Structure formats: structure tokens, C-alpha cells
Image: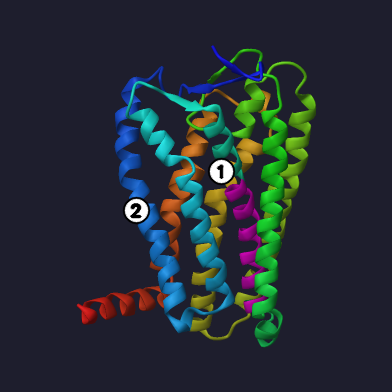
């Protein structure tokens, strides 16, 4: 096996489900169907949010960023999964693995913080409605979004760089579908307790703290919604917030199960199914969750479709 600089392999073998080949064709077909759906759904969300003036609000500004993140997130792993599942050659170059590692974790880390920011937006909208336009002004929204992106990039670059420096001792086989930090740490040899501890501490800030803030926000939102006298107002507030809460649970559940435990204790198939879930399932479902439960988005989508047919 050829090595780069005498320490890293030229390529990695991604075993995936090689021990269960009967799973590969169904997974290939599922990814081939869900990937275009995820791309189309998130592109539509971005288009309607940008083209419809009624959706030019902080909520849809953040939703546009979430859709963009989901497009990049799923694109960073699904094409490679399709290539490996559809061929006998299940490899990725060392450079390809490094690029995937950075992009996958930049998007994932940024999305963790963005979901927290979206819950804060809903908190201000429902619990401080009279001050909403003053607090969530355009300048602040852009500033908060820049901070979220900067934190996500800082987390990913620092963690991925440290992980890539771990010695592999001649090993170039990863029992996974993609290049992911916990799996690379688990595969590495030598002293890696410091890396495991660092990853756990960083992920407490990236996952646990935002999730606690989200739950605290929704506790306040729930109390405020119950005090709304209008049943129509309660229904609208509940519909908007429940969509976001479903997305939070779909994303944070698998992510916490992967990143808030030591990589050495992760079971063999856990990373594969978790990567499929938060890298494929969640980005595919997000557009449906936000459109099917949101009258404003459905109305904007209807207007967009009608305008396209009028042009034709």
C-alpha cells in the first residue's frame, strides 16, 4: 500500500455494507431516488423564499440558509455513496476523504447552530411579538448568520485537521460509507484519548448547549402559545414551531448518538445508519416538513407554479 509522506495512504477503502452485499442494491436505488428529491425540494424552498416578497422575513432567511446547507450537506456524501454502492471499487482518495471530511462537518456544525438560531427567532416572534421587527432586523440576522457560519467552519477545520494528523499505522480500511471524524479516530492507532476528549468537549458546545437552548425556547413558546386567545393564532403558532421542532429532533437525535460518546464505544454499524439518516433522510424530509405544514410556503409555491405556466 502506497503512503503519502510515509504516514497516510493514497486512498481509503470504504467497506460500507460489503459484508452484506444484498443491502447494496436497495440502498443504491433509495439514494438514487431520494438525492434528486432532496436537491429539488431544497432548491424550491430557496426559490420561493427569494422570489415571493411575502416571505422576505427573518424566518425564511434562516430557512433559505438551512436549505442551502442541506444541499451542500447531502452532496458532500451521497455521490460518493452512490459510486461505492454501484461498483466493486469501494475506494476514495486520501485527498477526496479530507475534502469530504471538511465539507461534511462544516455543513453539519453550521446546521447545529442554525437550528438553535431558528428557535431563537421563533421565541422572539411569539414571546416578544411587539418588538420582533426591532430585534430581528436585517442587519442583526445577517450578523448572526455570519457568526453561525464562522463557528461551524472553525469547528470543522480544527477537528478535521487534528483528526487527519492521527497515525494510521498502515491501515487504509474504514468500516463506513463516508469519511467521518469519529470513525477516523476509531481507526487510528496509538494514543488518541486526547482526540476523543477534545471531540466530546467541542460537541457539547456544538450539540448539547444549542439543544438545551432550543428546548428552553420552546418551553417559553409553549407557555406563550397557550396564552394566545385566538384559536387560529394558536394553530398558526403551533404549526410553525412544530415544523422546526420535528427538524430539530430528526437532526439532533442521530448526531448526539454519534458525537457525544467516545468513538471507541461506537458500534460497528451505527456510523453507517446514522450517516444515512442525518446526511440523507433529514435533508430529504426538511422541505416537505416546512411546506406541507406551512400555508405561506404552499401559497408562495402555488404562485410560482402559476407564474411559470403563465409565462409558457
Please state the extent of the stretch shown in magenta in the rendering: 106-125
Q: Nearer the viewer, residue 230 or 145?
A: 145
Q: Which residue is mark 1?
A: 104
Would you say residue 288 is visible in this rendering? no
2 vs 1, front mark: 1
Q: Is residue 35 left or right of residue 311?
A: right
Q: Nearer the viewer, residue 227 or 206?
A: 206
Q: Which mark is residue 37?
A: 2
Q: Which residue is nearer to you in this view: 299 or 228?
A: 299
169 sits left or right of 198 in the view = left
The structure residue drawn at horizontal position 53% and vertical position 78%, both measured from the top left corner, is 234
- x and y percent of residue 240 in the render? 51, 71
Coordinates of residue 73 in the picture (x, y in percent): 51, 48
Q: Residue furthest bottom?
A: 130
**Quadrant (top left, top right, bottom left, bottom right) of the N terminus:** top right
Residue 23, by quadrant, is: top left
Amino acid at each position: 500500500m502506497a503512503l503519502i509522506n510515509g504516514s497516510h495512504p493514497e486512498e481509503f477503502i470504504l467497506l460500507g455494507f460489503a459484508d452484506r452485499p444484498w443491502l447494496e442494491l436497495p440502498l443504491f436505488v433509495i439514494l438514487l431516488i431520494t438525492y434528486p428529491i432532496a436537491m429539488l425540494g431544497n432548491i424550491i424552498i430557496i426559490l420561493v423564499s427569494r422570489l415571493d416578497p411575502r416571505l422576505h422575513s427573518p424566518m425564511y432567511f434562516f430557512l433559505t440558509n438551512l436549505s442551502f446547507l442541506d444541499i451542500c450537506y447531502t452532496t458532500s456524501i451521497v455521490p460518493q455513496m452512490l459510486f461505492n454502492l454501484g461498483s466493486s471499487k469501494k475506494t476514495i482518495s486520501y485527498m477526496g476523504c479530507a475534502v469530504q471530511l471538511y465539507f461534511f462537518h462544516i455543513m453539519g456544525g453550521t446546521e447545529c447552530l442554525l437550528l438553535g438560531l431558528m428557535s431563537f427567532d421563533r421565541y422572539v416572534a411569539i414571546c416578544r411579538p411587539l418588538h420582533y421587527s426591532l430585534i430581528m432586523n436585517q442587519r442583526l440576522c445577517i450578523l448572526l448568520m455570519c457568526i453561525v457560519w464562522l463557528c461551524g467552519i472553525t469547528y470543522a477545520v480544527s477537528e478535521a485537521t487534528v483528526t487527519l494528523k492521527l497515525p494510521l499505522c498502515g491501515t487504509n480500511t474504514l468500516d463506513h460509507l463516508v469519511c467521518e471524524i469519529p470513525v477516523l479516530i476509531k481507526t487510528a492507532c496509538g494514543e488518541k484519548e486526547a482526540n476523543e476528549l477534545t471531540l466530546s468537549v467541542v460537541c457539547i458546545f456544538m450539540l448539547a448547549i444549542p439543544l438545551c437552548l432550543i428546548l428552553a425556547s420552546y418551553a417559553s413558546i409553549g407557555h406563550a402559545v397557550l396564552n394566545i386567545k385566538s384559536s387560529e393564532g394558536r394553530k398558526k403558532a403551533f404549526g410553525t414551531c412544530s415544523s422546526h421542532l420535528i427538524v430539530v429532533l430528526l437532526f439532533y437525535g442521530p448526531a448526539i448518538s454519534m458525537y457525544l460518546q467516545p468513538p471507541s464505544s461506537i458500534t460497528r454499524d451505527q456510523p453507517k445508519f446514522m450517516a444515512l439518516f442525518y446526511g440523507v433522510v433529514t435533508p430529504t424530509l426538511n422541505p416537505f416538513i416546512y411546506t406541507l405544514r406551512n400555508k405561506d410556503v404552499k401559497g408562495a409555491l402555488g404562485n410560482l407554479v402559476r407564474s411559470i405556466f403563465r409565462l409558457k
